[in-house]
Image (spheres, helix red, strand yellow):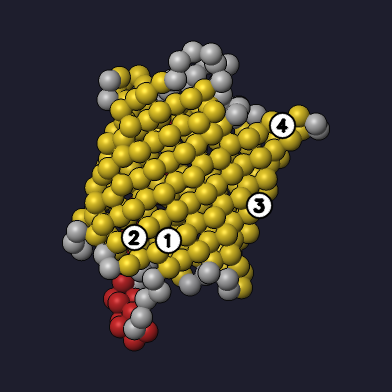
Amino acid sequence: MNIRRYHLFPWVFLFLIPVLACQTRENATDAAEVETGETRLWNLTLNGGLTVHTGNTRSRLLHGEINFDIRLDGFVLDTDFETLYGRSDSEVIQKKGKWASTFTRVLNKRLNLFGQVLLEYDAIAGITLRTTTGLGLRVDIHDGKELKTTLTTSLNGEFLNHEDPAPSRQYLRIHISLAMEALFSETSQLKARILYTPDVADLWRNYRLEADASLSMLMKKPVWITLKLKDRFNNLPLSSQIRKNDLTFITAVEIRL
């Protein structure tokens, strides 16, 4: 298996620090939750900022993201829309986006069943539309207010339309994801996620590896300043002109309602 291990080590390290830093705060957090009583059933986050991008292009880009989730009677609906757009003089040098929606059924304290739909496009990578649908299980390894850690696995059908005149492609992919969210204090938060998506028919060659990390600092409620790092590694891009690894840095203002 020809996965470049140096892509994995920094991201795994991110999961270890918050576990140690947040563990000592759990007892105080549980007591605070009892005192406050109600938990809000919905969350809305608006995010926008300037992106410095290196990879298939070098450019300044505009970034926008909207996330909404709602919890009702053992069900959770989560929707996320994200877009990146950039120009260099009169030329469009970046045009990509995604819409993801997940519907989750809570089975017990740690186990969740979910279905997901994901639509993506990337003009630079030659992807007109990539549609992914699937079913899976999510295990809540740790579900405290200070630290949340989840392991997710799912089986997904992927339908890829691209710019070349060749026929569209279909894949059956396994998604394995490890995600972490750590609240160091009331004003600082770290999030990280690693996603591995091999093709069932070609596990060792046709795979993608995605990694995300973000550090947020509260300025004044509800405004946060967020630094994001997004790494996308595709071991089998659509053409030899497209680089396998695509790295994006984002500085954004975030409003959490």
Where does label 3 land, which residue? Answer: 49
Residue at image position (55%, 47%) is: 82
Amino acid on which the number 4 mark rests in the picture: Val
Give percent across and percent down for residue 192.
43, 50
Real-space Cα distance between discs 4 and 2?
Answer: 37 Å
**Which mark's residue is nearer the viewer, 1 or 3?**
1
Query: Within 10 angstroms of label 1, few (less than 14), some, or many (20 or more) residues?
Result: some
Query: Within 10 angstroms of label 4, few (less than 14), some, or many (20 or more) residues?
Result: few
Q: Do the residues labelled 3 and 4 touch (CB within 8 Å)?
A: no
Give percent across and percent down for residue 57.
65, 29
Where does label 2 land, which residue? Answer: 76
Residue at image position (66%, 52%) is: 49
Where does label 1 land, which residue? Answer: 69
First in sequence: mark 3 vs mark 4: 3
Where does label 4 land, which residue? Answer: 92
First in sequence: mark 2 vs mark 1: 1
From this viewpoint, is residue 190 visible? yes
First in sequence: mark 4 vs mark 1: 1
